[in-house]
Amino acid sequence: MRTSLILILIASTLSACGGGKEKKARPAALVEAAPIAPETFTDNLDAVGTAFANEQVILSAPVTERITTLNFSDGGYVSRGQVIATLAAGQEKAELAAAQAQALQAQQQLERIQALKARGFATAASLDSQVALAHSARASAQQARASIGDRVIRAPFAGWLSLRTVSPGAIVTAGTPIATVSDISRIKLDFTVPETRLSMIREGQPIRAVSAAWPERPFTGTIATIDPVIDPATRAVRVRAILPNPDRALKPGMLLTVNVIARERQSLAVPELAVVGDGEERFVFVVEEGKAKRTKVDTGIRQNGLVEIRGGVKPGQTVVTEGVVKLTDGVPVRLPGDKPEAKSASADRAAG
């Protein structure tokens, strides 16, 4: 008898517990959702490049000589052909004068022999010999002029000069730098692109560059040249872009961050918070008939807080954008503005 009473009590207890669970129905989760729609995505290529002057040359002393004049100031602008410096050329000028005198004498003697030859009083051999002497004298004069010209250093193109490191009166040896001329009206920006992303770039493509000196000011330009040879050590190709630099804000040697906009496309997109991961797979929750359906999707790039969706859902489907942490597959959901039907039903069941 006592055993029967115990079994009846246990059965009553289990029945009461089961009834409690049935009454505690899970309320619908409050989430936010929106129809999935296409957005513009861009394939960007980021790199780091070094700035170079459009043209740059170090002007050096061609011979060992004393500097007589320097015709530039630190950082000054020079035009093409402007004299930068002159070296002493006293001996060369004397040699030029002597060569010119010899050339004049040789020419006069040639004219006399030509006159005698015309009258039959000079041989052809003597005329040929004098012609050779006249040519040699003129060549000596030209050589002396060239030697003097080497001592006048001119700017090969217009540009800005570096800081001066020599002074008038100093004796410089051949090869000593006197000034650096840089044309920075535009900048050559060199950077490297991995071989695997070579198909994303082409000549004429626009780029955007930012320097640490001007972080709030982007500089725009275009790709001018792509090196036809890939470096076998780095498996990368060198690319050169041209950036206009009218105010000379960019300086040769600067390090710039480069962004190349490779191509744009339209793809479906959802906010980053809408995507959940499970190992290598990605999922979103699609709202169908008041319930959240866990749907596998194929994702692409992330950009501006959005994730590209390449497959798995269709345009216009409603996707949960906030509150995915509350959801599992098949649970009821409630959107802002919906009536709390799930809570009312649960209360009715509890009252019953």
Image (cartoon, rainbow, N blue to C red):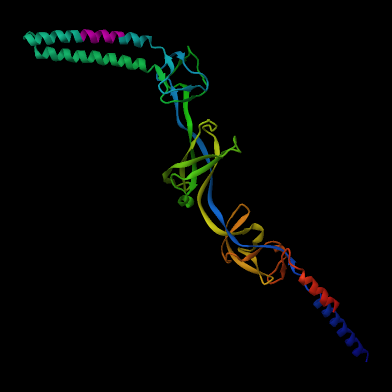
Query: In terms of image quadrants, where is residue 88?
Result: top left
Residues 162 and 347: in front is 347
What is the quadrant of the C terminus in the image? bottom right
Q: Position of residue 180 (x, y in %)?
A: 47, 25
Which secondary structure dominates the residues rendered in magenta? helix
In the displayed structure, 235 sits above or below 188; it is below
Q: Residue furthest bottom?
A: 1
Residue 322 on image: x %, y %:
69, 60
Q: Residue at x 7, y 9 (%)?
A: 119
Q: Nearer the viewer, residue 274 or 181?
A: 274
- Residue 253 in the image: x percent, y percent? 52, 33
* Residue 101 falls within the magenta-colored stretch: yes
Point out residue 276 in the picture as x, y percentages from the top left corner: 65, 62
Q: Report the side of 198 relative to 30 (left or right).
A: left
Is residue 255 one of those drawn in magenta? no
- The residue lying at 82 percent from left, 76 percent from top is 348
Query: Would residue 322 be found to the left or right of residue 157 on screen?
Result: right
Question: Total label count?
Answer: 0
User: Is 194 on the left or on the right of 315, as rendered?
Assistant: left
Point 40% across, 20% down: residue: 62
Give the magenta part as a residue range. 97-106
Q: Pick the quarter of the image with the N terminus.
A: bottom right
Classify 211 as above or below 329: above
> Which residue is depicted at the point 17% across and 14% down?
131
> In the current view of this chain or complex, which residue is farthest to the right?
2
Q: Quadrant of residue 297?
A: bottom right
- From the viewer's perspective, is residue 263 above or below residue 76? below
Name the image quarter holding residue 216. top right
